[in-house]
């Protein structure tokens, strides 16, 4: 893990790859808009020929009214596709129930003879990551669809794995679910 990086973590799920592609797609559109507006501003400043009798130009007004909604559609369509892709649960082979407590997380593998354990944060030293290392790590198989059911017993928590594009809130009294698919094994 490297600190102060300006790009994404290495993706470990198809969803994260889609999110990185969507980010690149949106950034390309925004950079093109920025260059066009910068060029127009420089052109207006450098232009010495100004016609003060021009009161309106319906074609230009039509263009700057139609182009922004078209650009928003080009951004919204991939965004909506990703939104529905995140909520899709494809026949999971197992379900993991995760409960947030004020100082720890508890996990239940209900599909396999009710395996339950609690995960507490451990004291940091030079070998561990600060505020990330725990005593009992969650073991999740890769190359399979896994369903995560997440809730909380006391306050709102956030359960996150950035390289898998997972960030879900654990809210008391509500069970949230998310699909998980990992491309390769590792510690996240």
Image: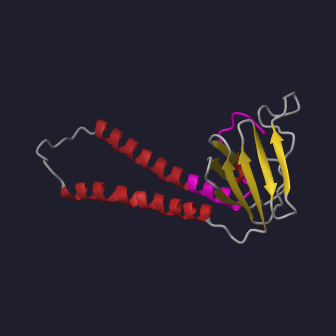
Magenta residue span = 1-24
Q: Residue furthest bottom?
A: 91
**Taking 162 as reference, is 141 above or below it?**
below
Is 36 situated left or right of 96 in this image? left
Tell whether 48 sits left or right of 133. Answer: left
Is residue 55 visible in this depiction of the protein? yes
Residue that appears at 65% across and 39% down? 6
Instruction: Where is residue 155? Give x, y as percent.
Output: 63, 40
Question: Would you say 3 lies left or right of 173 here?
Answer: right
In the rendered view, would you say 90 is above or below 106?
A: below
Q: Please provide percent x and percent y for residue 60.
A: 24, 55
* Residue 169 magenta-highlighted: no
Is residue 186 something that shows in the picture? no
Front-lying residue, 80 or 71:
80
Rendered image quadrant of residue 133 = top right
Q: Nearer the viewer, residue 135 or 152?
A: 152
| Farthest top residue in view | 125
């Amino acid at each position: 893990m490297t600190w102060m990086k300006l790009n994404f973590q290495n993706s470990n799920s198809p969803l994260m790859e889609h999110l990185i592609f969507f980010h690149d797609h949106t950034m390309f559109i925004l950079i093109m808009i920025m260059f066009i507006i910068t060029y127009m501003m420089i052109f207006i400043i450098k232009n010495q020929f100004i016609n003060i009798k021009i009161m309106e130009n319906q074609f230009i007004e039509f263009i700057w009214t139609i182009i922004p909604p078209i650009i928003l559609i080009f951004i919204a369509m991939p965004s909506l596709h990703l939104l529905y892709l995140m909520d899709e649960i494809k026949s999971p082979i197992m379900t993991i129930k995760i409960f947030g407590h004020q100082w720890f997380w508890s996990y239940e593998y209900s599909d396999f003879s009710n395996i339950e354990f609690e995960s507490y944060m451990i004291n940091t030293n030079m070998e561990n990551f600060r505020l990330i290392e725990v005593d009992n790590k969650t073991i999740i198989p890769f190359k399979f669809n896994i369903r995560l059911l997440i809730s909380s017993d006391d306050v709102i928590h956030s359960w996150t794995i950035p390289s898998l594009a997972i960030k879900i809130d654990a809210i008391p009294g509500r069970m949230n679910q998310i699909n998980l698919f990992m491309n390769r094994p590792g510690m996240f």
